[in-house]
Amino acid sequence: GLETKQAMVDKIRSCVDKYPRLFVFSVDNMRNTHFKQIREQWKEHSIFFMGKNRVMSLALGRTEEEEYNDKLHRVSKLLRNQRGLLFTSQNEENVVEFFDEHAENDFLRTGGIAEDTVELEAGPMTQFSHAIEPQLRKLGMPTELKKGVVTLMQNYTVCKEGDRLTSEQAQILKLLGHQQAKFKLNMIALWSREEGDFKMLREDFQLTEMEEDEENDDDNEL
């Protein structure tokens, strides 16, 4: 609702006034559990905002005339898709070093892109109990029970590198314990209040002209 949005605008602007640095980040393979752990780890000196790009842009200012502080409209231009804001008292070196090194392994979901080819050889699959065999067969695997042991009757390719996973492929990889996803935050830009400076940390995340036009069209709908 309107009151919730206004509260978020006010909170973001108070963070602009409070914290010396503001990072824009993107997220690979968003997982709420991992993100909550990061929030908890950084709560003493930092605060994260994510999920309401248009409201965050409104708080910061979407144009040079509207911006809440110098150069914040450049931050707003980067807010799209799975991106968020990190307000922090930590210096640039500490933030960049931590998030460059920090990643959490997880399972790919339906629609995720396979990073590896996973091939299984025919034969006993002793890691599975007999009770799971019907589920494996239902997922498309050529399995049977042989003397109570789940057995793959022929070589089977679960996925190939670059495949966009179906629901069945994602479930099979999870059952196999095969983690191809990495939850990771990428720091892509930095705004410093004290220096009044903005800089890109990852130029490959800069909006193209076409994307900026699309963003402006979206803004006009608000």
Image (cartoon, rainbow, N blue to C red):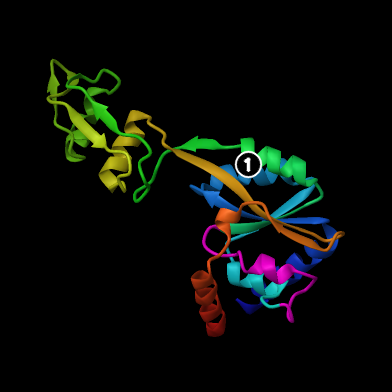
Residue in view at x 25 percent, y 35 percent: 158
Viewed as shown, does residue 215 lie left or right of 49?
A: left
Q: Is residue 65 magenta?
A: yes
* Chief secondary structure of the magenta portion: loop
Quadrant including the C terminus: bottom right
Q: Is residue 8 magenta?
A: no
Observer-nearest of 177 and 69? 69
Instruction: Give residue 50's quadrant in the image.
Output: bottom right
Viewed as shown, does residue 50 lie left or right of 166?
A: right
Residue in view at x 51 percent, y 49 percent: 30
Which amino acid type corresponds to the residue marked 1 in the rendered image?
A: Gln
Q: Secondary structure at mark 1?
A: helix
Residue 72 place in picture, x, y as percent:
73, 68
Q: Which residues are magenta?
A: 64-82
Instruction: Give residue 152's quadrant in the image.
Output: top left
Return the residue found at the far top: 147
Residue 217 place in picture, x, y as percent:
51, 80
Is any atom of residue 206 visible in this view? yes
Observer-nearest of 112 and 5? 112
Residue holding disc 1: 37
Residue 13 place in picture, x, y as percent:
77, 68
Residue 89 place in picture, x, y as percent:
82, 49
Residue in view at x 57 percent, y 42 percent: 34
Quadrant including the N terminus: bottom right
Viewed as shown, does residue 57 lie left or right of 14?
A: left
